[in-house]
Image (cartoon, rainbow, N blue to C red):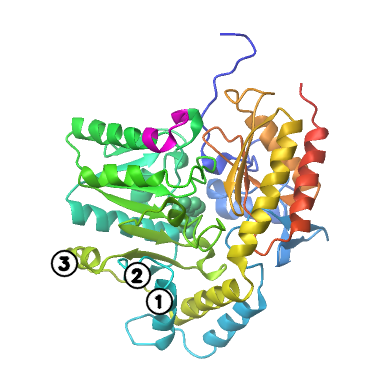
Amino acid sequence: MEPNVRTPRARPILDMNAYDAAGAAAGPAGSLLARRQANIGAASVLFYREPIEMVSARGCWMEAADGRRYLDFYNNVPSVGHAHPHVVEAIARQVSVLNIHTRYLNRWTEDYLDRLKATLPAALSNVVLTCTGSEANDLAMRIATEATGGQGFVVTEAAYHGNTLAVTGISPSALKRGALPTTVETVPAPGSAAYGNDVAGGFRAAVEGAVQRLAGRGVAPAALICDSIFSSDGVFADPPGFLAPAAQAIRAAGGLFIADEVQPGFARTGAAFWGFARHAVTPDIVTMGKPMANGYPMGGVAASPDLVARFCETVGYFNTFGGNPVAAAAGLAVLDVMEAEGLQENARVVGVHVLDRLRALSAQDPRITGVRGAGLFIGVDLCRPGDPGQPDPELTTTVINGLRDRCVLIGAAGRYGHTLKVRPPLCLTREEGDLFVDALADTLASQPPA
Ligand SMILES: Cc1ncc(COP(=O)(O)O)c(C=O)c1O
């Protein structure tokens, strides 16, 4: 091996751009940082070499305690914009009228579900509401195992699907050490690096291989579960349609196809309301969360009545807070805003503009070895100059902190932590997109290649 060629090391998603509590001072006694570390201990995860204290936010901007305003290119939860007045008003109004679990009838929950279902394939006409994406994926796993009799799951190499015991088991990117359960097999994310020119065929063959490896251990497949924009894998969007053959492959083996829409759902990819729709595939189960209620905790699982009924024959499911009237009011308000402000189209148009500008930047800077995405979900790979085989997570972290210094907030993704994850609120303007690309160019220029 050449001396300057390093073997890339897989990085857990929560370690990327994380404040290093062990390596840095905890701040003066009584400071917010010291109190945070004392209160939450090792479970505390903070961004940046120097964490930021936030005090308020509006639209695409967040304001910090030091008086600086930061352009938010990270947060996909306040998808219609931070503190959107229509959502704020809907939550405040509903919480002052009725907020109760769903074992009584209330019209807000059904109004919301009717509106939500109009965005989904007709076959998925039952929706179970939860509070988080993790709960939604946990439930989807249980529905799939019950329906198929299988226990096996196929996931991508750097997938993240949430934080329950079961869901952590299908989230390779959550692991710091140890191994995945023997019921789980991984496949490389669907990009040209792994599959060359035939991403669809290669990904399907990889899923078939994973099913065979499970069979070799006596495990039948329950499902292939994919984040349909492959966010933590590093954002893989093209060519549209590549998911369909893999979905066919898992079904041929007796498993289901679960689309995890927690990241790409709710219009983010611009081309469609759901990420799977870009791939012309109807999943057996769709899970959702994050942007669903713009920050009010809300998630959900959509499936056919048959799948839901089969699951409920064995075990009951009730979620105390899931789909309560306040969540429903918030969710409804999000759908209102998306429609009224044309946010799907905005994501498409502004997304193309940002992608074009990033591609132009990559043509000038050989450290940018890949720019991929759809709508306002874009991944930018940073590597040793001109060598996509040499990921540069250190440069990526430096760039993220450099952007912070220039008042732009962004995160990392990818198996090796070398992909900038570009994921602003959907109300982003072209001018705000330009501010980001200009700040990125300036940051890279301040870090000349070694
Ligand atoms: C693709 C994906 N699925 C599920 C989840 C879990 O969602 P939550 O954190 O709301 O439990 C996440 C969270 O980051 C995610 O990125």
Spatial CA distance of label 1 from label 3 is 23 Å
Name the image quarter holding residue 50.
top right
Disc 1, SS: helix
Residue 215 placed where, x, y %?
Answer: 19, 34
If you read the primary sequence from the N terminus, does the residue marked by circle 2 or circle 1 appear first? 1
Tell me the residue that label 1 is attached to.
Answer: 113
Q: Of the numbered discs in the image, which one, if any, rests on residue 127?
A: 2
Kindly check if marks 2 and 3 are in contact, taking CB atoms under 8 A apart as contact.
Answer: no
- Mark 2 or mark 3: which comes first in sequence? 2
Mark 2 vs mark 3, foreground winner is: 2
Q: Position of residue 378 (x, y in %)?
A: 61, 47
Q: Earlier in the sequence, mark 1 or mark 3?
A: 1
Which corner quadrant holds the C terminus?
top right
Residue 25 seen from this side: no
User: Relative to residue 64, is residue 335 drawn left or right?
Assistant: left
30 lies above or below 414: below
Q: Position of residue 392 (x, y in %)?
A: 64, 28
* Labels in figure, total: 3
Residue identifier under label 3: 313
Cα distance between the residues tagged 2 and 1: 7 Å
Q: Are marks 2 and 1 in contact (CB under 8 Å)?
A: yes
Is residue 196 part of the magenta span, yes or no? yes
Rendering coords of residue 360 (x, y %) = 73, 39
Residue 90 appearing in the image: yes
- The amino acid on which the numbered mark 3 sits, given as a three-letter code, is Glu
Name the amino acid type tagged 1.
Answer: Leu
State the predominant SS element of the stretch in magenta: helix
